[in-house]
Image (cartoon, rainbow, N blue to C red):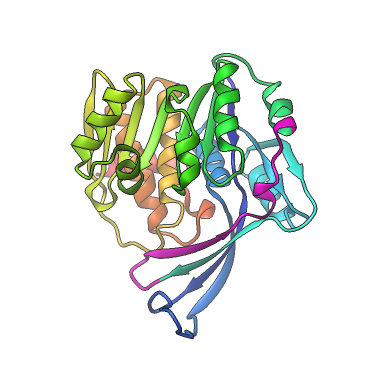
Amino acid sequence: MKILSFGSMNIDYVYQVPHMVRPGETLASLGMETFVGGKGLNQSIALAKAGLSVYHAGMVGEDGGILLDALTKNGVDTRFVAKKEGKSGHTIIQVDEDGQNSILLYGGANHALTEKEIDEVLSHFSKGDLLILQNELNLLPQLVKKGWEKGLTVVLNPSPFNEVIGQCDLRQVSVLLINEIEGKEISGREDPKEILDVLLEQYPHLKIVLTLGSLGADYADQKTRLHQDIFPVKTVDTTGAGDTFTGYFIHGLVSGVPMEETLRRCAKASSIAVSREGASPSIPYMEEVLRSLEEK
């Protein structure tokens, strides 16, 4: 089985601020750093650091060398990354004194995908392979449909949530990873149990992860319901924490790790990630996660 992460790559400009900028306010930052990120890149690196072999597909602009270097350095295969004219995707991220963030996203090359390029990349994969998707590329509904038609196992993280998600056929998705906001938008419910109930009634084949911030995460399928609490830490930067959880969850899923242990590893990996600055640089390796779990 091969694993393809088809997703965004961004250059993250991260500003430390005393509080989020308010309308009409000019605010001096306390510091600024540049990181590589994007949900696709973060999830690919999380998968690789968890111990899986992963291919990344997507688009970078003329300034995208830093993104390709980061993927390669972390053991991700970049042969399916295309180069486009113009700018790569980038973000402007505010991180306040409590470690919470606010993100302004510019799509750049991430929104230059064509159906021809989708077909070319997917021609190298076959039934039973894994296709991991987020919503920071254009043509997401086509990616879901084409992956499903080839018999790939489609894993969808519908973030950031917008009208495009409503155009995706969740009957073509096997694994859905959502937060409480996305869960509410898709199901029309606010209570976590009701979100899972509604989604499994509509899509009984799904495996669902519902992350709940400080309240932990829930897992559900037709046979199993599990809850995982967080591991409390001092939060430095929450950027990339959800992507870390996604990468470690997929690792457990494809490696046959029992779901209870998979969720523990996800929670521990995410807790380590939020205790550090940056997105992909904050993602821990599996060895560190397992060692930290043994210390508890």
Q: Quadrant of the C terminus?
A: top left
Q: Nearer the viewer, residue 85 or 162?
A: 162
Which residue lies at the image location 46% right of the left edge and 52% below the top edge?
240
Residue at 28% in and 44% down: 295
Q: Is residue 270 magenta?
A: no
Residue 128: % across, % down: 54, 15
Can residue 111 be seen at all in this image of the molecule? yes
Asked if the magenta segment contains residue 115, the reply would be: yes
| Most foreground residue, 171 or 252 | 171
Q: Is residue 46 above or below residue 11?
A: above
When the figure is inspected, residue 90 is found, relative to residue 148, above or below; the finding is: below
Question: In the image, 6: left or right of 93?
Answer: right
Quarter containing the N terminus: top right
Who is closer to the viewer here, 250 or 220?
Answer: 220
Q: Is residue 284 visible?
A: no
Q: Nearer the viewer, residue 100 or 174?
A: 174
Residue at x 75% of width, y 41% of height: 82
Looking at the rendering, which quadrant does residue 259 occupy?
Answer: top left
Q: Which residues are magenta?
A: 96-116
Residue 262, how many percent across, how many down?
34, 31
Q: Position of residue 26 (x, y in %)?
A: 49, 85
